[in-house]
Image (cartoon, rainbow, N blue to C red):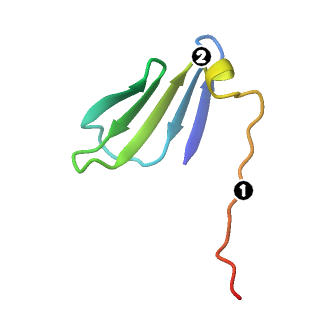
Amino acid sequence: MKVKYFNDTDTALIEFADREVFETREISENIYIDVDAEGNIVNMTIEHAKSNAALWEFSYEEMNKQTA
């Protein structure tokens, strides 16, 4: 997964998979997802990212399955 931020347009692009985009779907006025031919998410675009996604800070945490 890659997260790219374009400061000049305040747009965030989250790339989930390296597959061909079949269709772009509008989730809301400023959020779009790209899916492949099987309906799997490929990318997500967030316009006006700083206000719509609070993209002032970004962190990543991988959660491991806990065993009892």
Badge 1 or badge 2: first in the primary sequence: 2
According to the picture, the residue beneath numbered tag 2 turns out to be 48
According to the picture, the residue beneath numbered tag 1 turns out to be 61
**Which image quarter: residue 25?**
top left
- The percent position of residue 36, horizontal first and vertical second, equals 28, 44
**Which image quarter: residue 8?**
top right
Above-or-below relation of 40 to 51: below
Between 41 and 29, the one nearer to me in the picture: 29
Question: In this rendering, would 4 be left or right of 33?
Answer: right
Between 67 and 15, the one nearer to me in the picture: 67
Q: Residue at x 64, y 28 (%)?
A: 53
**Which image quarter: residue 42?**
top left
Q: Residues within 10 Å of mark 2 (few under 14, many from 20)?
A: some
Callout 1: SS = loop
Between 34 and 1, the one nearer to me in the picture: 34
Tell me the kind of residue under disc 1.
Answer: Glu
Q: Residues within 10 Å of mark 1 (few under 14, many from 20)?
A: few
Question: In this rendering, would 42 be left or right of 57?
Answer: left
Callout 2: SS = loop
Q: Residue at x 58, y 12 (%)?
A: 9
Above-or-below relation of 7 to 22: above
- The percent position of residue 65, horizontal first and vertical second, equals 64, 76
**Residue found at the very far bottom of the displayed protein:** 68
Q: Residue at x 47, y 35 (%)?
A: 44
Tell me the kind of residue under disc 2.
Answer: His
- The percent position of residue 50, horizontal first and vertical second, equals 68, 21
Distance Cα–Cα, label 1 vs label 2? 24 Å
